């Protein structure tokens, strides 16, 4: 009796499996081709042309500061792609915001779920950090993003970037920590850095535009590798001297200004095949 | 036309799913009709954690131990039951609550009559490797448990990954309850009332080591503290005093006390990142149970979890080795007592001056703010306290 009952069940199961397979081979079934493609952003981090190695005093700035990188986390936002015809396509996935922790491979890859037109593209742009509209306090309640919060009294929202370093010049016997942190700057009246003396805030986010040449093809993910060339934070238009800011950067708009000045040339597009 | 083809595909998938459901219906029926051993259907009441304002929405609850009212009820009994040690003698009783005392935000407290200076030891007198961490808001602990994060989802060794595993280990290890799981199970099994409680919580009246740990872990996950004066300030219900506000500024500014990077604040109301830092307390490292012992990364030598600062008023002594007896001593340390070492956290950027160099009045303000994190309702919450009547009584 059992055997008799099992027979139809096996047939049903086989039928089910066949149906599933028929569903997955959708393009062969109905000759329908997708009319859109997609992109995967990969964030890579280099120093002087080599992959970033954490926690090792391997690097040296142009003005003679040796340094190591211990942590690196940052936001990019308002990511957009420009078609060869000049139309900008904004990324909507995750509201166009991506958090990267350079020590966490998962966060270094961003699968974009947008439906992107099949065509040629010639430029990518994004904001480094978050703009006024998106940089709202308590926007992220879960770590790791929530750990990036920037105190309300210093402008609120989130650190655009936390890069924690240790540095040492040739005359120092011990390395010193340096928190290369960027977010909303403050303008203080007088020499005080007490929040009571703040008379204004400075939005330090900046736009990065990178020319490129790639095609989005039907049904495929186009990989785009954004590379942060870390040495350029310190050796750009303004040589950045860690010794100049012994009390850190978060309450020093000058330091953040120079960092952002250099930051505009920190990114490059490595691959867009 | 495209829409029609898409709909056809959807229809095919739906048909396939329906067939699959029918062909495996026996399995579904079995899972739906599970009955407890007392004959009633097993339908524990789901328990939903109410998430306080701005707290994380992601909770650390394993999928194989969902929170239920019955599980929490059982866990609360077990948490407070000295018979968990599996020993009948009145001097051999030990439960979680022997050390985790509600009045001290679930540490034993510096004034404990047995655990001198707040350093607990197990039934056999062997001290724990470290002093205690507050048992607060662990449902949001996302980087492992204990000072070094040893019990973590990343641990390749099974049995060392979840809060349930912590409970299981605590019952067994000599530094704590030093129990024998068979003896514990047998003892709990024979106490009138417990089999029924297990039955209601897990659908079986058989007491198992796994279900003991699951129930206690469920109870611990309910220990949420989010009703301090500072919480009420953030909700606009009360105003902080001038001194508390000044302390708040010091806490949240890099050129002030710079506490927030490791201990959270208005953007991270847990008042900890749950991450690990060498905070500059030592330059010689002899503790074999630091973060380095877990990761093998030389930059983790001397690093420990940043504890939550909530209910700091109740949780002395402070640091993993109980170095500081008072909040004043902790503030003095961060003000001028830091020592350099190669593995000092890069966030301790005031190391060149051995600390943040606060004035006496600034220290008072910072302390006032820290005390505004006191949640007195937490330490008297009857839902967290010893049940008035234990099973078998």
Image: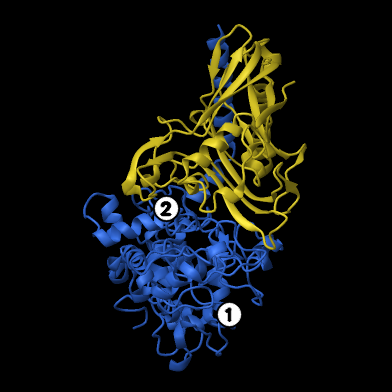
Residue sitting at x 50%, y 83%: B85
Q: Is residue B115 visible?
A: no
Report the residue marked by disc 1.
B182
The residue lying at 77 percent from left, 36 percent from top is A49
Chain letter for the yellow part: A
Chain B display color: blue
Vertical arrangement, residue B2 with respect to residue B210, above or below: above
User: Is B135 in front, or is B243?
Assistant: B243
Badge nearest the viewer, 1 or 2? 2
For marks 1 and 2, the one nearer the N-term is 1
The colour scheme is by chain
Q: Residues within 10 Å of mark 1 (few under 14, many from 20)?
A: few
The C terminus of chain B is located in which quarter?
A: bottom left
Do the residues at pointers 1 and 2 share their chain?
A: yes
Residue A47: percent from the left, percent from the top?
Answer: 73, 40
User: Is label 1 in a helix, a strand or a loop?
Assistant: helix
Q: Residue B122's spot in the image, x, y percent?
A: 53, 85
Which quadrant would the N terminus of chain B be assigned to in this image?
top right
Residue B236 shows in this picture: yes
Residue B69 sits above or below residue B56 on the image: below
Q: Residue tagged by mark 2?
A: B253
Please give the chain letter of the residue carrying mark 2.
B
Residue count near mark 2 (Cα–Cα under 10 Å), binned few <14, some 14–19, many ≥20: many
Q: Left of B40 or right of it: where is A74?
A: right
């Amino acid at each position: 009796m059992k055997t008799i009952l099992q027979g139809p069940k096996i047939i049903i199961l086989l039928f089910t499996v066949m149906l599933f397979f028929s569903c997955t081979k959708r393009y062969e079934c109905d000759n329908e081709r997708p009319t859109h493609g997609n992109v995967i952003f990969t964030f890579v981090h280099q120093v002087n042309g080599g992959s970033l190695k954490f926690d090792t005093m391997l690097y040296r700035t142009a003005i003679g500061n040796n340094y190591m990188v211990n942590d690196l986390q940052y936001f990019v936002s308002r990511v957009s792609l420009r078609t060869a015809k000049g139309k900008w396509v904004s990324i909507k996935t995750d509201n166009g915001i991506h958090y990267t922790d350079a020590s966490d491979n998962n966060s270094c890859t961003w699968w974009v779920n947008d439906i992107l037109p099949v065509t040629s593209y010639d430029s990518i742009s994004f904001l480094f950090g978050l703009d006024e509209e998106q940089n709202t306090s308590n926007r992220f309640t879960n770590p790791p993003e929530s750990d990036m919060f920037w105190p309300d009294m210093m402008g609120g929202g989130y650190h655009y970037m936390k890069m924690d370093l240790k540095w040492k010049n040739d005359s120092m016997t011990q390395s010193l920590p340096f928190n290369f942190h960027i977010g909303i700057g403050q303008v203080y009246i007088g020499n005080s850095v007490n929040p009571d003396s703040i008379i204004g805030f400075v939005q330090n986010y900046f736009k990065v535009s990178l020319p490129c040449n790639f095609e989005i093809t039907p049904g495929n993910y186009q990989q785009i590798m954004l590379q942060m060339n870390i040495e350029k934070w310190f050796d750009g238009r303004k040589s950045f001297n860690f010794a100049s800011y012994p009390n850190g950067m978060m309450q020093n708009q000058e330091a953040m200004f120079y960092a952002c000045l250099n930051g505009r040339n920190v990114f490059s597009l490595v691959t867009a095949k | 036309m495209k829409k029609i083809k898409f709909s056809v595909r959807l229809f095919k998938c739906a048909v396939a799913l329906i067939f699959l459901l029918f062909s495996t219906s026996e399995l579904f029926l079995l899972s739906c009709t599970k009955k407890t051993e007392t004959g009633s259907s097993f339908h524990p009441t789901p328990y939903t954690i109410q998430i306080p304002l701005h707290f994380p929405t992601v909770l650390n609850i394993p999928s194989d131990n969902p929170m239920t009212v019955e599980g929490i009820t059982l866990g609360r009994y077990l948490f407070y039951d000295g018979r968990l040690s599996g020993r009948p003698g009145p001097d051999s009783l030990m439960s979680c609550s022997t050390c985790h005392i509600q009045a001290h935000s679930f540490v034993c407290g510096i004034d404990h009559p047995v655990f001198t200076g707040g350093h607990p030891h197990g039934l056999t007198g062997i001290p724990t490797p470290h002093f205690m961490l507050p048992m607060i808001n662990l449902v949001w602990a996302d980087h492992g448990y204990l000072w070094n994060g040893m019990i973590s989802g990343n641990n390749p060794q099974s049995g060392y990954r979840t809060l349930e595993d912590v409970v299981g280990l605590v019952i067994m290890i000599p530094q704590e309850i030093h129990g024998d799981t068979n003896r514990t199970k047998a003892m709990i099994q024979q106490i009138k009332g417990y089999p029924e409680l297990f039955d209601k919580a897990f659908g079986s009246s058989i007491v198992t080591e796994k279900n003991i740990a699951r129930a206690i872990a469920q109870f611990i996950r309910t220990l949420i503290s989010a009703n301090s004066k500072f919480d009420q300030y953030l909700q606009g219900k009360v105003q902080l005093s001038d001194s508390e506000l000044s302390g708040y500024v010091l806490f949240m500014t890099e050129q002030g006390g710079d506490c927030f990077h490791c201990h959270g604040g208005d953007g991270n109301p847990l008042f900890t990142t749950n991450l690990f830092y060498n905070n500059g307390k030592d330059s010689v490292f002899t503790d074999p149970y630091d973060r380095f012992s877990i990761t093998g990364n030389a930059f983790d030598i001397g690093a420990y979890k940043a504890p939550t600062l909530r209910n700091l008023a109740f949780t002395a002594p402070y640091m993993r080795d109980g170095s500081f007896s008072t909040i004043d001593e902790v503030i003095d340390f961060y003000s001028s007592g830091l020592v350099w070492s190669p593995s000092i956290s890069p966030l301790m950027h005031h190391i060149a001056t051995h600390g943040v160099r606060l004035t006496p009045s600034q220290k008072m303000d910072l302390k006032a703010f820290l005390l505004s994190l006191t949640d007195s309702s937490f330490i008297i919450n009857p839902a967290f306290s010893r049940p008035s009547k234990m099973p078998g009584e």
